Amino acid sequence: MGKRVLFVVKELEGAEPLGALYVAGCLMAAGHECRFVGTRGNDVLAAVRQYRPDVVAFGATTGLHRYYLGLAARIKEVLPSCLTYMGGAHATYFPDVIHTPGIDVICRGEGEDASVELLDALDRGDDHTKIRDLWVKHEGVVYRNPARELRRDLDAIPFPPRELLYEYDDALRMRPLKSFTTNRGCPFPCSYCFNPSMVEHYGSSWKKVRIRSPENVVAEIVHVRAKGPLQVIGFRESIFVYSAKWLREFGELYRREVALPYYCHLRADMMTEEMVDLLAWSGCHTVNVGIETANEKLANEVLDRRIKMDRLADGIRMLKRAGIVVFADNILGIPGGTLEDDFATLQLNIDLDVDYAAATLCTPYPGTGIAKYAIENGYFKGDFELIDDSYYTESVIEFPDPSTKRQTENLHKFFAVTAAIPQLFPLVKQLIKLPPNDYYYSMFRAWYLICHMTDVMPRRPNILPLKESLLSIFGVYKGVDPNWHSPPRPEWLPTVDVPAPSPSPGAAGTPIRLGRKKPSEVTDVRET
């Protein structure tokens, strides 16, 4: 018969929620019914009343989790019989969120197979408390299950059913930029990233990068292009390419079947002349690389990047020489760093002539190495509820001097424009001494928009950020969501640690699609 699942996504105006879509695709293949709803107006509660789902599912990052917890409480008031199911980064990092009233099940890590098992068990009326990767609240007890083995063959996973988004809002189908992923896993232990938490959950198998075959990736892109306009491809994985061999095979297919500009994420220190040439040849328009900090000691001892700054700089120069647009990520306010370190990072972006110098404020997300370091060294008290849903506004890091915190937050707003117009640097050093204000933030948003509409993303008209930026300049745009409801306080319940079954079922779940080609695994990526 199958169950009904309603996926709630707060930010449908951004990149497609691929994680939720992958889960939905597997559920549909297993015979369940899925719908997606955004959070415009009262859409969520109206959808709950009309659709009457058996399960309401959502993925949350830290900061945004408060929104979903409050929403879950309201959903329970409207439809007490439904099961609320949280996945995403926050549930993985901070599984104790299960103790919050209104949350019935959380998923840690990848959700496809666990979700199919959960919905199948509910459909059959079977016990659903002993499913690997899930923490389940049932009859006043929380059941904490161990991790399952990772699914190795990514080609066997159904393509994300994007038509579910289009059924909610056909304008989403008309967007010219659409997102894809080519691999999962990461061999690097960067302390500000979620990957070390996944290693803690899954073990060392997470470090073995699982890569889709070029044929499978290109087949998905061709499939999506047949459904609606497509002008730019965005590859969203942490690192797009580990192997020149894979890139060459991908490029041959991509140039023949797709031939559209794409952007991707890379580690610049991994670049070789051959890989850069292949990127440019295959259609890469923009790369997103992490500079993070100019201080190599901070980069390796605090951020655990295992990187040599000279190799990183060489990689960026190679990309620039090949005519590829370089979008650089940077982190300001790193625990143990200084304002002078942040100035040096800005200067490095200027020296390397990056096309857009993005900056975030260091955020100690739960379960990350940077959070542990910040707590142990007195830079953060460990109250994760203080973390905002954006790392663009203010820092939760405690600075020795309050004026340094203020200047760091202000420098963030001026970072990108100063990298583009270095003559502003002396003036900016004075302006950041003023109190933070809305004008600085509006300028930051406007510059971000201008760069993304011109150099960074090709052929990507999008009126929504323009509207927000212009309104915020005049203090009109507030971004208040009518679904906002204060989340309830946790109620700590007894817990049961469910032992792993023997023999291990591995990556249990319904086989959905025959793979076209076995994926390769990369275990020998250089760590320097």
Image (cartoon, helix red, strand yellow):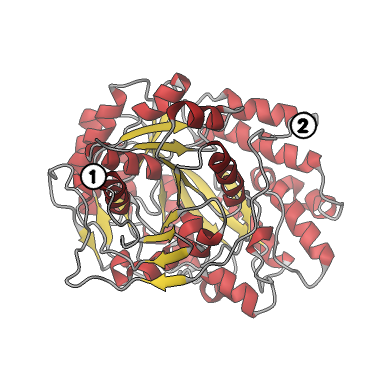
Q: How many marks?
A: 2
Eyeballing the image, is 307 above or below 139? below
Mark linked to residue 157:
1
Tell me if mark 1 has few (under 14), some (14-19) or many (20+) residues whose alpha carbon lies within 10 angstroms of its own. many
Q: Nearer the viewer, residue 61 or 505?
A: 505
In the rendered image, residue 254, in percent from the top left (x then y), is placed at 24, 35
Image point (57%, 40%), residue name: 77
User: Who is closer to the viewer here, 58 or 435?
Assistant: 58
Quadrant in which the C terminus is drawn:
bottom left
Is 106 drawn above or below residue 34 in the view shown? below
Residue 438 - label: none
Residue 455 makes an appearance in the image: yes
Q: Quadrant of the N terminus?
A: top left
Q: Which residue is mark 2?
A: 473
Res. 348 in view: no
**Image spot of residue 184 (x, y percent):** 32, 54
Tell me the crowding category of disc 2: few under 14, some 14 to 19, or many 20 or more residues within 10 angstroms, Cα based: some
